[in-house]
Image (cartoon, grey):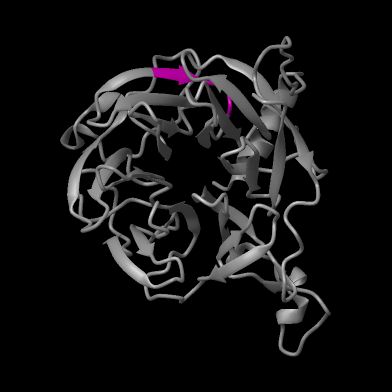
Amino acid sequence: MPVFKYAILALAALAAQGQQPTLKRFPAGDAPQYRVDPSWPKQLPHNWIMGQVGGMSIDDQNHIWVLQRPRTLATEVLGAAQTPARALCCGSAPSVLEFDASGNLINSWGGPDFVPDWPKTEHAVRVDRAGNIWISGNNTTDRQVIKFSRAGKQLLEIGHPSDAPINNQDTGLLGKPAGIDIDESAHEVYIADGYLNSRVVVYDSDTGAFKRGWGAYGVPLDQISNDKPAPYVPGEPPAKQFNIVHCAKLSKDGKVYVCDRVNDRIQVFTKTGKFLKEFFLRPATIGGSVFTIAFSHDKAQKYLLLTDGMNELVSILRRSDGIEVAQIGHGGRNAGQFLGPHQLVIDSKGNLYVGEGVGQRVQKFILQGSR
């Protein structure tokens, strides 16, 4: 079900109970604080506009990479792309967009039919240290991750498009993979797999050879059910299986943080898949409160910044225990507000960039002070 439909259901449920959704207030503390920069990014060239933001990444030059979904743009806003043209504006931008720190578009490529196995619904993007671009998709037949050069030349493919059913034991095929991260020193790619499968899988980032994988609580692949899991019910015991593995992110101290979106939780593992702990966030949320995370830019990575796409905000959590210490934003279309915050990244200065699905835009938030 699309994000915006989940959000409508959640609000309807609150209304039926006579409740109004409210934002939590926090005492002043040392959590990072931000202000929105409404001038970022600059206007796109060539009459281009963006669709839903599927994925985001940031490279060593503080360039922000956005993977957007051209096929989500309504015909009504693509007047200049019609034959004959119906209006002065607009046309769809390519799927892969590279912005410099000032918000200028400096590179773009990709989109439907760019390569034979280009995903039907663009989802994750990750730039590795060598400048290679990894992408995935979460459409029904998107069962692959593709590695490209910075200029868009295909270098490697893990999996391939397929309409095969759920199979958490098949390591030659992915399951609508939602997130990608790279362990540079080990030459490994971690894949949050995903919308169909319920696992984290790790491959050699040079050859694509499978190395290992696990499910919720670190169970081996052969113990993961191939039945689609039911949503978590508040008050019930925690779900034994992932339900939309939406991210897998590596911390500097060698932990793997997994976003279990519909189960409203983060699970933490070693790189070998040993379960360490879990955090829950707003567990009554329909559709999931845990979309993706980024680590704060301080040396200890004291905080997790998290997109909650159903509650239309960004949460700041203590990494040590998952306690929420601050919130950014609110539902809406104004600068600093969100409609379906889906992805986020943090640059080397601590500035925050948030990509929206429903809102079809990227916003920059400038870190205040030295935190």
In the picture provided, is 64 more to the left or to the right than 320?
right
Residue at the image point whose x is 57% and y is 69% from the top? 108
Secondary structure predominantly adopted by residues drawn in magenta: loop
* Residue 107, horizontal then vertical, whole percent: 58, 68
In the image, 27 versus 368, the foreground residue is 368
In the image, 91 versus 148, the foreground residue is 148
Residue 68 seen: yes
* Residue 253, horizontal then vertical, whole percent: 36, 26
Q: Quadrant of the C terminus?
A: top right
* Residue 263, horizontal then vertical, whole percent: 46, 27
Identify whether 132 is placed above or below 261.
below
Residue at the image point whose x is 36% and y is 70% from the top? 154
Residues drawn in magenta: 278-285
Q: Residue furthest top?
A: 27
In the image, 163 versus 302, the foreground residue is 302
In the image, 60 versus 262, the foreground residue is 60
Residue at the image point whose x is 27% and y is 31% from the top? 271
Q: Report if residue 284 lies within the magenta region.
A: yes
Image quadrant in which you'd find residue 41? bottom right
Q: Report if residue 1 lies within the magenta region.
A: no
* Residue 282, horizontal then vertical, whole percent: 58, 21
